[in-house]
Amino acid sequence: MQFESADDAVELIRQLQDELDDVLPEARVLVRQLEQGPPFDAPIELRLYGPDVDRLAELGDDARAVLSTVLDVVHTDADLTESLPKLNIKVDEEEARLVGLDHMSIAQQLDTTLEGSVAGSLLESTEELPIRVRWSNSGRSDLMQISSLDLIASASQATQQQKYIPVSALGEVGLVPERALIARRNGRRVNLVRGYITSGVLPGKVLAEYREQLQSSMNLPAGYEFEFGGEFAERNEAVGKLSASLGVLLVVMISTLVLTFGSFRLAGIIAVVAAMSGGLGFGSLWLFGYPFGFMAILGTMGLIGIAINDSIVVLAALREDDSVRRGDRKAVRDVVVRSSRHIFATTFTTIAGFLPLIIEGGGFWPPLTITIAGGVAGATLLALVFVPSSYLLVQPVTTVNEQTEQPRIEPSTEECVSRFPELISA
């Protein structure tokens, strides 16, 4: 299926979510768009830490109730809220002792029958596959058939008629709920409360509202604390990994600029342009109403590399002109005008390359493309206005000795004869 725009796909996802929720109210149905970026289970996640599992479950239910009232939250769940059915057998010890069975032997026979045992292996190509023999799936899923399952009595206690004893004769068989998971994080018990939001809605907006409601309505007892995970945590972790190598990249970039221009002052101009271009990218992001996230950070890093190229071109052209080095402002203007054609061409082609992604919209590519395109447009003005002005301020004017600038006049023949008569006579 093809869509004219990303908004049509988002609208279809929302319709499917509403219809499936109405048709299957007993199930939790999630219709989600395929996303890129740091992976996470749920956009909104709250991590509750504490020593007591039951208390953590109660706090998780309270936090989940608050989360369900937040706008654009479709479904919620928590680890300690979910339970799984567990087969429970209350053994009559007297009946079991009469046939020579105990808890251990009963459990071993049931495990062998229901879970199976390895009876051999099968060689497929170069891989050896184990063969497990167990009861059929239809029997393993039926509680009545499990109750009528025969156990082998002890050889010393059993008679010919009592060789096989049904499970129901040794006790009561039933299903009891059991916690599906008791998770730990960094060695501490944790209850994860997750929230799934409407397609097309930014997680940061929903998280801000949930944080505000949670702080006003939930008080944690001593020894319990919480933190936010999900998209928020994954984004911060990704940003931290990028920032870890940022210092090394800055040192390499500044060292390269100093070696290229042979001047700390000129390298400082490029560094200021890089910082200002990053601010222009953030301004473009704010102007179009997109949040500052992981893709915006990637766009800013790419923007800095593109933005300083124009400034380096202008700065290199200024250094090569002798009139500019002597402080001739008219020569500075001429150099900037000559360089503007290449700079404008680079700017227009860069913005044109990102226009399809900007027009397409969505929540993934626009933060990156708008940051780069808007920053490059502003960096063009920095290269044509800020760089020449800064060059005139920081670069010392080169002075030339007036005697060296006077034109050289060749002496006439008469002057040579009058000055050196001995050379003529020789």
Image (cartoon, rainbow, N blue to C red):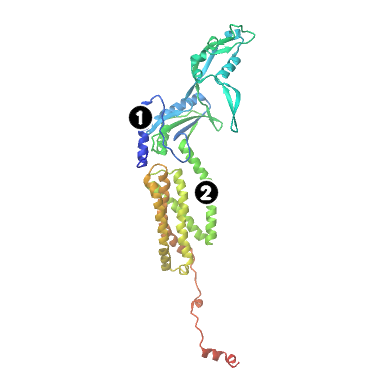
> In the rendered image, is residue 61 in sight?
yes
Local crowd at mark 2 within 10 Å, few (<14), some, or many (≥20)?
few
Q: In the structure shown, which secondary structural element does the residue marked by tag 1 occupy? A: helix
**416 w.r.t. 235: above or below:** below
- Judged left or right of residue 53, residue 367 is left
Instruction: Work out which residue is located at the far right of the displayed protein and give it.
Output: 156
In the image, 138 versus 252, the foreground residue is 138
Q: x%, y% of residue 120?
A: 61, 24
Q: How many marks?
A: 2
The disc labelled 2 sits on which kind of residue? Leu
Q: In the structure shown, which secondary structural element does the residue marked by tag 2 occupy? A: helix
Mark seen at residue 198: none
Q: x%, y% of residue 321?
A: 47, 67
Labelled pair 2, 1 in contact (Cβ < 8 Å): no
Q: At 58% across and 16% down in the image, what residue appears?
A: 109
Q: x%, y% of residue 151?
A: 57, 13
Quarter-wise, where is residue 419 in the image? bottom right
Q: Which residue is mark 1?
A: 19
In the image, 117 versus 81, the foreground residue is 117
Give the mark toward the camera: 2 or 1: 1
Q: Quadrant of the N terminus?
A: top left
> In the rendered image, is residue 92 in sight?
no
**284 w.r.t. 405: above or below:** above
The disc labelled 1 sits on which kind of residue? Glu
Local crowd at mark 1 within 10 Å, few (<14), some, or many (≥20)?
few
Q: x%, y% of residue 42?
A: 45, 34
Q: Which residue is mark 2?
A: 246
Q: Quadrant of the C terminus?
A: bottom right
In terms of sequence position, does the residue under pointer 2 or pointer 1 come before the other?
A: 1
Mark 2 → mark 1, Cα distance in angstroms? 47 Å
In the image, 303 versus 118, the foreground residue is 118
